[in-house]
Image (spheres, rainbow, N blue to C red):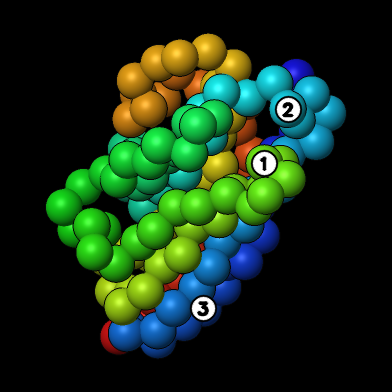
Amino acid sequence: QVLLVESGGGLVQAGGSLRLSCTASGRALSWYIMGWFRQAPGKEREFVAALDWSGRSTLGPRSVQGRFTISRASVRSTVYLQMDSLEPADTALYYCAAGSQRGTMSDPLAYSDWGQGTQVTVSS
């Protein structure tokens, strides 16, 4: 099992930036894909971004493309989500997830381990 801990959330004004971090421990090096999802109140969980062991990345909805970037630290146990030009619509609880096998990176079912989430609130 991989233990995931997110950090970096907070309150920011529209147009601002945040960088979320996800640190894996336990069987940290067993992950093959790591991703970020978000869930706003009253809405379904939404795929945001992910990358695989080789560093190949993919982004979610068009609304985050060009504003969000996913990357990893050299130690591979930490993954970042850089969020720029934040909008009130980005307000949500952001979750980090890890999967140990190849899968469709945008599919929540491809992930076996989830963090507790970090809140991002963007004020207008």
Which quadrant is the C terminus positioned in? bottom left
First in sequence: mark 3 vs mark 1: 3
- The reply to whether residue 26 is visible in this rendering is yes
First in sequence: mark 1 vs mark 2: 2
- Say what amino acid the circle numbered 3 marks: Leu
Q: Cβ–Cβ below 8 Å for labels 1 and 2? A: yes
Residue 122: image quadrant is bottom left
Residue placed under numbered mark 1 in the picture? 76
How many angstroms separate mark 3 from mark 1 (CA)? 28 Å
Which quadrant is the N terminus positioned in? top right
Question: In the rendered view, would you say 31 is above or below 44?
Answer: above
Coordinates of residue 116 in the picture (x, y in percent): 65, 43
- The reply to whether residue 5 is visible in this rendering is no
54, 68: nearer the viewer: 54
Left or right, 86 with reference to 120: left
Residue placed under numbered mark 2 in the picture? 29
Question: In the rendered view, would you say 122 is above or below 99?
Answer: below
Tell me the number on the disc at residue 11. 3
